[in-house]
Image (tube, helix red, strand yellow):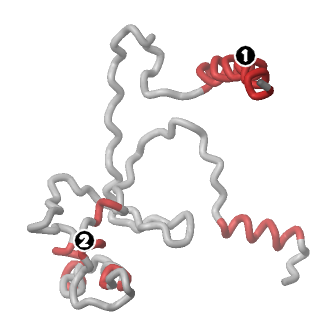
Amino acid sequence: MKHLRLAILAAPLLLASAAFAQNQVATLRNTAPLGEQGEATQIPGVVNTDIRQVRNYPDQPPLIPHKTDNYQVDLNSNKCLSCHSRTAVEVSQAPMISVTHFMNREGQTLGAVSPRRYFCTQCHVVQTNARPLVENEFVDVDKVLDYVHSKQGGSD
């Protein structure tokens, strides 16, 4: 009975907060009402600079700094390995895939890419020049450490 009263009292608050949030959330619909078909936005372009992006956190999979349109990555072929495999990096000058991709689940080193690391686009994605839907307030760990050191007077 106590939980029922609490639920009844909380219901108007939840409805009010949902209505408020609905007016604040950015959407892909732009300004089109739900009952109408809105104009489609342009598909953002892929960043194709071949310049490595800085990682935002430890163990973040690197972003792909080039287009991967029509790359075949399936059981029969992996186009990524034509440049990033151990034997191809000397010619392609692309970074070699991590040695962790040559380990199985038990941590044993394999002679070829582990089957669980074979499908590159499971973790690695291309970067686009899309406008973010929400403001990003992410702060890199180096900036946090600089801030902490400045507040401590530079002592360790």
- Mark 1 Cα within 10 Å, few/some/many (few <14, many 20+)? few
Q: Which is nearer the eye, 15 or 117?
A: 15
Whole-percent x and y of residue 56? 55, 63
Q: Which is nearer the eye, 106 or 54?
A: 106
What residue sits right under mark 1 in the picture? 12
> On screen, 1 above or below 65?
above
> On screen, 118 above or below 139?
below
> In the rendered structure, which amino acid carries the disc numbered 1?
Pro
Q: Residue at image x 17%, y 59%?
A: 71
Pointer 1 or 2: first along the chain? 1
> In the rendered structure, which amino acid carries the disc numbered 2?
Tyr
Secondary structure type for disc 1: helix
Q: Residue at image x 22%, y 80%?
A: 85
Whole-percent x and y of residue 30? 45, 21
Q: How many marks?
A: 2
Q: Quadrant of the C terminus?
A: bottom right
Label ID, residue 133: none
Secondary structure type for disc 2: loop
Q: CA distance from mark 1 to mark 2?
A: 50 Å
Determine whether, in the image, residue 3 is placed left or right of residue 125. Answer: right
What residue sits right under mark 2 in the picture? 118
The image quarter containing residue 24 is top right
The image quarter containing residue 112 is bottom left
- Mark 2 Cα within 10 Å, few/some/many (few <14, many 20+)? some
The image quarter containing residue 97 is bottom left
> On screen, 51 above or below 45?
below
Determine whether, in the image, residue 1 is placed left or right of residue 136. Answer: right
* CB within 8 Å, label 1 to label 2: no
Whole-percent x and y of residue 138? 63, 53
> On screen, 121 above or below 15?
below
Q: Residue at image x 28%, y 66%?
A: 120
